[in-house]
Amino acid sequence: MQAKKLVFAVVAILLSAAAMQGQSPFAPRVTGPLSQRVVAYQIDATYVPDKHEVDATETLTYHNLTGKPLDHFPFHLYLNAFQPNSTWVREAHREGYFRSSTFNKGWDAKRNGSNDVTSLEVVGMGDVTKQIKFASPDDENPDDKTVIDVPLPRPVEPGQDVIFKIKFRATFPEVVARTGYKRTFLLAGQWFPKVGVWWNGAWNCHQFHAMTEFFADFGTYDVKITLPKDYIIGATGVQTSDTDNGNTTKTVAFHAEDVHDFAWTADPNFKVLESEFNGSVGAVRIRLLTYDSHKSSWQRYIDVMQGTMKRFDEWYGPYPYAQITVVDPPHGAMEAGGMEYPTFITGDTLWWAPKGQKAFPEVATEHEFGHQYWYAMVATNEFENAWLDEGINSYTEVKVMGSLYGKDTSLLNWLGAQMGDAADQRMSYLGVAETDPLSRTSYQDMSMGAYAGVTYGKTATMLLTLEAVVGQETLQKALHVYFMKYRFGHPTQEDFLRTVNEVAGQDLGWYWQQAVYGTQVLDYRVRRADSARVDWANKDAPEEKNGETPFVTNVLLQRLGDFIFPVVAEIKFDNGETIREKWDGQDRWKRYVYLKKAQVLSVEIDPDHQITMDRNYLNNSIATEPQRGAIQKIATYWLFCTQFFAQMLSWLA
Amino acid sequence: MADDNKGLVAAGASLVWRRQRVLWWVFAVNFILGAMGTASAHHQLEEVLGRSLAGRSLTNGFDLGMFLELVRVPESNLFRSHHDSLHAGILFFLFMLFITGGILTVYREDRKLKTGEFFGASGTFFWRFVRLALLALVPFIILGSALWGADKLSDYVGDRAVSAETGFYIFLAGAILITLLALFVRLWFDVAQVRAVVQDEHKMWSNLWKALGISWRNVSTLFRVYLCISGVAWVTLAVGLFLWAKLPPTATPVTFLLLEFIILMQLLTRLWQRASAITWYKRHAAAFPADAVDYTTPAPVELAELGAVLPEQAPARESEADGGTEIPKDSQQQP
């Protein structure tokens, strides 16, 4: 019996090992290649936890599909951003902060990070290490080392391959800007030398900026990571092997296809949870790497992942990969949270996060999964047009969160207070409504706040407002078409705008000019709404009677901002009659006059609350009767707070 | 002494109940100052929401987005009025500092004082209590610093711990300890105020140290009383806020009553602590004989006899001028 059990166990282990070896990076009904594979990375890395360092050998095969001979190659060395005089740090210092970190109190050595290329050989051309030069194409900062330029002894002809063999060391900072360590936890993002993108007839390889993210070519990744045995690891793609090295280490191999980046994480304290999503192309494994102290969030992570994947699958298109890895960073590592890499995302939560608030982990997780579509597959240039990934993703976040948790409660439904995700995006937009156009090169936005407000909030608000013009279903269809057409490519903002025009069947140039290329502010107002007796001049006029006395009603609408947008105004009368007027908004004001045996009760612009770009909701309506409910409620709360503060202070008397 | 401490909490409550005019007046002033501090915000709300339908989402629920818009949009900019609330709080603090002498006199006498008597007593003790309040800054600043230290310690330890809760529990433990210490400091200064009123102490510095000795020697009794009454305040606050969260969003009048009830209970429990402290002190005044002197009013003397009497009276007057800790006659009469 014992022998039988042993044989069964051995067979089971062999079968699972075989399955692991043969693990496809794609969902069951998907076969590659899905993208035009420009790069093939093979990386053999060893992680030294005590030093927070990785020593690695990288072999990059680059297929020259540019149609031109290439005589030099730029590479990103992103980790060099974490040095005091880098462009990234200068920008973060200028702003005083980056995400949850402050950058105005001196340089903390824990923030040091680096990518050191110790040798670079071009196969067939020799060692070119000495020819490497740092480049600063964006700001000419001589101290920035986030981009290197590698000149070749001879050009790589169109259609030919070139192979780079790079030895490098990555030193991670204490977690900042989406990468680094915290205690035993490591999030290794942007950790290896990554070649730039030949795009629009030139190399596109920006320095690392504080406000923006990344851009890279599609390809394949085969990465082996050697690390201590007790570490649990997760990464882009799927795990293909796990080899015990016979000492205190093991080597884990990962394989990914049709992705444009590779990130991984490791921590001996991880707790692994798995779930399966059955989408239109088959089962996708959801692998959650979390912690015991986040137990209250485990099911919430799984629920939001299931719900989000279902809606993306139904609304926009299939998720074609076999696995999505969700990392729940430990406490104190928020800087690693809320980040996206292909087939690999980081969420965020707090051990005490109340269920009534959905910012953590729901919104963070939904948003990062959304990036699998708007970044990982539709791989737009995040340096230059961040709104195409962050912004469109914020819009779909509003739609998915609203669908999952209620339109008006998708961010907060706790202690009697409610807030929808759309309102949050709008809040973000309101503060920077006129600072930057969406079309501006993103890292050149006015400030960090402006970048965030414009890229995330303004785009989401702009697309929500567009629903008032083309309809929600049309916009959803446009996003579906855009995704299906441009997945595994590098579309531009014009590609997106053109797609929406085509699906909507109308030229929306008037809208794009203001909302995307312009900084006009949208603000409409009801300036006047009143009724007066027609016979007001007659001293002997009969007594006023409901439904019998004629009134002349004046309604005056005004456009305060420069953003021209067609609006609907709803006029309600005291006889129950409701009229909806459409105004094209071209002129500065519009008057409506009604002669009725009824008086006006209220006038409201945008009664369906679709024009979320309107900067001021408070002036969108006038009621002829006092509206005291909200005033009394807020005044009551304010009074209580004042009294409570006063009695607390008197405790010191 | 143990028997004397029985029913102290109830006796304090009973005293507050018998002299409830004090509570209602304090509540009325708190309400009026609160209303004054809120008036400009109320006016602003009238300006932007008085004729707007935008407030409906706040009436039929509490749309935080709309509330934030009220805060953010320049036309409303709700929080520009927060200074008025701050000023109202400071005024109430000064008011309470002023009338504490009157309140303690009412509780000491356990009778209704005429308005003149009340404010006379308030004025008599005001500057002494100002001095005590200034001295109180020292321990409260130390405790505030300790809380800051607990926060930093919890960050430091929490940052190195695997468990996410570790830092929080360290801070929680520190905060609870500091709250209890703050409660003891409050008790200590309350006893000092009671001594100032009951024994007409003038020298607040020495009074403070004597009050500390008394508070420390009787800490088990007095602190238990204070903790018990504070517990009532905290539970009332928690239950009140729980009920508030359960109320329908449109029930503003009921919400108003509930929130005012919470304020009333907070003020009541504070007065309850003071009443309990003075009740305790009156019961045990005889236990501090070292400071006691004969407070019997001397019999009237003929002016012609004055010259002969003065030499004998001199030491007693000197004692009073020193801010000695004589126990008033009425206090001595109460065992």
Image (cartoon, coloured by chain):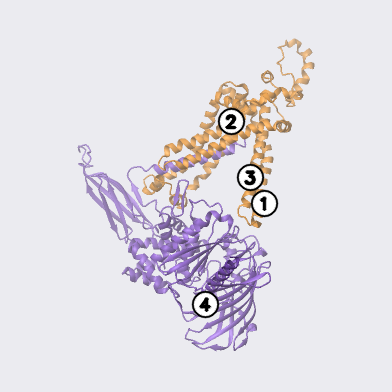
Chain colours: A purple, B orange
Q: Are marks 2 and 1 on the same chain?
A: yes
Labelled disc at residue B175: 3
* Chain on which label 1 sits: B
Q: Name the residue carrying label 4.
A: A220
Q: Nearer the viewer, mark 3 or mark 2?
A: 3
Query: Along the line of sight, which residue is nearer the eye, B269 or B24?
Result: B269
Task: Give the spatial CA distance, label 1 vs label 3.
Answer: 12 Å
Q: Nearer the viewer, residue A238 or B80?
A: A238
Give the mark nearer the N terminus: 1 vs 3: 1
Q: Is residue A304 above or below residue A122?
A: above
Horizontal side of residue A229 vs A431, given as left or right: right
If the image is split into quadrants, where does the C terminus of chain A sit? top right
Query: Is residue A483 shown above or below A530?
Result: below
What residue did someone put label 1 on? B153
Mark 2, residue position? B271
| CB atoms of marks 2 and 4 within 8 Å | no
Give the amino acid at mark 1: Leu
Q: Quadrant of the N terminus of chain A?
A: bottom right
Q: Amino acid at mark 4?
A: Thr
Position in image of residue A410 (x %, y %): 44, 55
Query: Distance of mark 3 from mark 2, alpha carbons?
Result: 24 Å
Alpha carbon distance from label 4 to label 3: 54 Å
Q: Where is A238 relative to A573, above or below?
A: below
Cα gap from disc 4 to disc 1, whole angstroms: 47 Å
User: How many other residues sit within 10 Å of disc 1, few (<14), some (14-19) or many (≥20)?
Assistant: some
Picture residue at 34% right of the left edge, 60% below the top: A468
